[in-house]
Image (tube, rainbow, N blue to C red):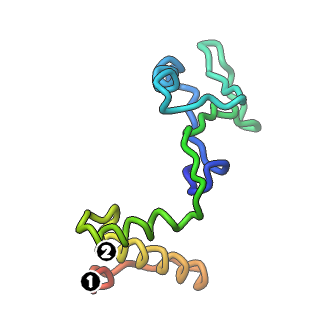
Amino acid sequence: MISEASSRGGVYRESWVDQAKWDKWAKKGYLKKDGGKGQSAGSSAVVDVRDTVPAAKYDLPVTMDKPFHQPHLENFFDAIRNKTGLNCPAEIGYETAVTVLKVNEAVQAGRKLDFKPDEFKV
């Protein structure tokens, strides 16, 4: 799960993935191993469907000391002032908003709703 609030985010290594593959990224500083220990299923592991083995958690070593929406606003104003590119083009932002609003509508209706291609056009 990734959140703009760094304390609420993390990535998890599945037990079947070799820990060494993740450790190399931790050594490079891209990941930070959380204190929690994941468990791997050994060759003599017995499956118990009543309890899920917790996955090893890794934190992303990035913190943000600004209000959550400030980087978006800074990027927007930089694009206007300096003609730099937007991190998220307006078309993608619109498609994302349409998707989120449709999901909210489906939850409120309590049923599956289908997307129509014309809903993604301005």
Q: Which residue is mark 1?
A: 121
- Residue at image location 59% in from the left, 78% down from the top: 107
List the single residue furthest toward the left.
83
In the image, residue 7 sits, relative to residue 112, either above or below, namely above
For the point 27% across and 86% down, which residue is it?
122
Report the number of discs.
2
Tell me the number on the disc at residue 71: none
User: Is 110 in front, or is 59?
Assistant: 59
Task: Report the amino acid beneath label 2.
Answer: Ala
In the displayed orientation, state which residue is furthest to the right: 50
- Precedes in sequence: disc 1 or disc 2: 2
Q: Nearer the viewer, mark 1 or mark 2?
A: 2
Left or right side of 103 for 7: right
Q: Residues within 10 Å of mark 2 (few under 14, many from 20)?
A: few
Q: Nearer the viewer, residue 118 or 60?
A: 60
Q: Which residue is mark 2?
A: 90
For residue 54, what is the image quadrant? top right
Secondary structure at badge 2 equals helix
- Asked if residue 12 is positioned above or below residue 66 in the image, the reply reads above
Q: Position of residue 97 (x, y in %)?
A: 43, 76
Task: Name the amino acid type tagged 1.
Answer: Lys
Q: Is residue 74 left or right of residue 43?
A: left
Element under disc 1: loop
Inter-mark Cα distance, 1 to 2: 12 Å
Q: Identify the residue at the far top of this view.
A: 44
Instruction: Kindly identify the residue that appears in the image at 49 percent across and 80 percent down.
Output: 101
